[in-house]
Image: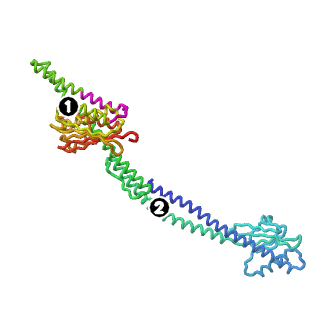
Amino acid sequence: MKFSWKICFSTVILSLLIFSIGGYVLISALFQSTYERETANAGEENRMLQYSFAAYWSAAIQDMELSKENVRRTADAMVEGMAGSDLRIRISDGAGQVLYDNAEADPDTGLLETITRTSRGHMLRKTDSGYELQTASMVCLGEEEFLYLESIRDVTELFRERAFQYRIYRQWLVGLLAVQSVLCYGMASWLLRPLRRLSRAARRIAEGNLSVRARTESRDEIGDLAADFNHMADNLEQQFQELEDAARRQEDFIGSFAHELKTPLTSMIGYADMLRTTEVTREEQFQAANYIFKEGKRLESLSFKLLDLMVVKNQELELKPVKIRWMAEDIRGMLQPSLKRLGIVLKVIMEEAVLMLEPDLMKTVLLNLLDNGRKAIEGEGTLYLLGRREEGGFAIYVRDTGKGIPREELSRITEAFYMVDKSRARQQGGAGLGLSICQEIVKRHGGTMTFKSIQGKGTMVRIFLELPGNQ
């Protein structure tokens, strides 16, 4: 069953219970009030008849003899004196024997047993034609003599009025519930319309269309749900894109790794087979062995870099407080001689700061970045190693005046085995793992590494690290 139907049925059933109970209680209360008023009127009428009979008895019966004939004469005189009142009375003696009766109702001695000289009683009787209210009291004719006076009042109309009210209320209730059902279903459908849109969006996302979003029109709980759904869809699309990128990088890694192994191995096997099966001169033998040695060293370097990458990803770093200016000067001393021979100037401008670093790994990062800058410079040029405090931490910049990197390549240069200029990188002994290792080392330090480059003008790398304490 749809949720809108559930809401509609629940509301209608709840309204039915509330209105049914409320209407029953209201009509019953009104009936009880009217019945009590009728009972009070009947009591007053009986009291009036009690006094009237005693007065007529005193005036009409001189000998004061209690007999059936005297009672009949007194009762007839009283009834005639109250002409037009449609009195229905019954008079009985102390033993319950009926002395006068114009009520045409079955006597009930049980009521007479409940009354005394100072009290009166009443009871409701159901007859074939309806309901009667019977009220009884005791008429004292002397110190010892008394009679029972019963007055009977027809209250059938009172019960008919209650039945009529119940019938009208049921008809009104049925009509009200019918109208309420239609309005409630329409209201529920309107309120649940955002959920239906949300459901359609979820189905389309499940079918693979991750760009679908739910439309948010309200600021209530359903609007919040739609906003949360869109936020979830954004994260899901981002994670899916990241998974696709990771799968692509993994495929590229495997392909590049296979290619990096295949080329030197093919050459090494070819030269080794030539040495094994062919007579060669001493000079040719030396050249072949030299090539096999160089390619073997390149494979060794590749394996060490792969090992470094795996170690960096999994090892726990032991961070120490390091003066970054001291590290920069140490790097200048290491690179200055080789760069001078190449006609490259290294400029170091580093502010004083103490950073929590693993010194050997961070030195590896800076050396690798400077070495990449050296390789990008054709002929003479300048390398910069800069550092300064910035909001929230410390930034290290490595900049070169080389040929730069194409914009479309910047997002991939930290992928394993990815090389912008593959032929040139291999000639210089590279395998495309250096920036991957640097990226992982910076990440393990809780920092970020970003790249900016302009072709023909150079590349700048920014490493941002948090400062410890309140520096």
**Residue at image point 16% right, 35% down:** 343
Residue 88 x, y percent position in the rendering = 75, 74
Residue 275 x, y percent position in the rendering = 13, 19
Residue 268 x, y percent position in the rendering = 17, 24
The span picked out in magenta is 301-323
Q: Are marks 2 and 1 in contact (CB under 8 Å)?
A: no
Q: Total number of numbered labels? A: 2
Circle 2 residues within 10 Å: few <14, some 14–19, many ≥20: many
Q: Nearer the viewer, residue 121 or 245?
A: 245
Residue 210 x, y percent position in the rendering = 32, 48
Q: Which quadrant of the figure has residue 412?
A: top left
Q: CA distance from mark 2 to mark 1?
A: 85 Å
In the rendered image, the quadrant that contains the C terminus is top left
Q: Which residue is mark 2?
A: 184
Q: Which residue is mark 1?
A: 338
Q: How is the image coloured?
A: rainbow
Task: Give amino acid for label 1.
Answer: Ser
Q: Per the image, is 186 magenta?
A: no
**Residue at image point 34% right, 35% down:** 323
- Classify mark 1: helix, strand or loop: helix
Q: Earlier in the sequence, mark 2 or mark 1?
A: 2
Residue 146 left/right relative to 29: right
Residue 263 is at least partly visible in this image: yes
Residue 94 left/right relative to 343: right
Residue 259 is at least partly visible in this image: no
Q: Per the image, is 316 magenta?
A: yes
Q: Nearer the viewer, residue 294 or 92?
A: 294
Q: Nearer the viewer, residue 86 or 447?
A: 447
Q: Which mark lies nearer to you, 2 or 1?
A: 1
Task: Give amino acid for label 2.
Answer: Cys
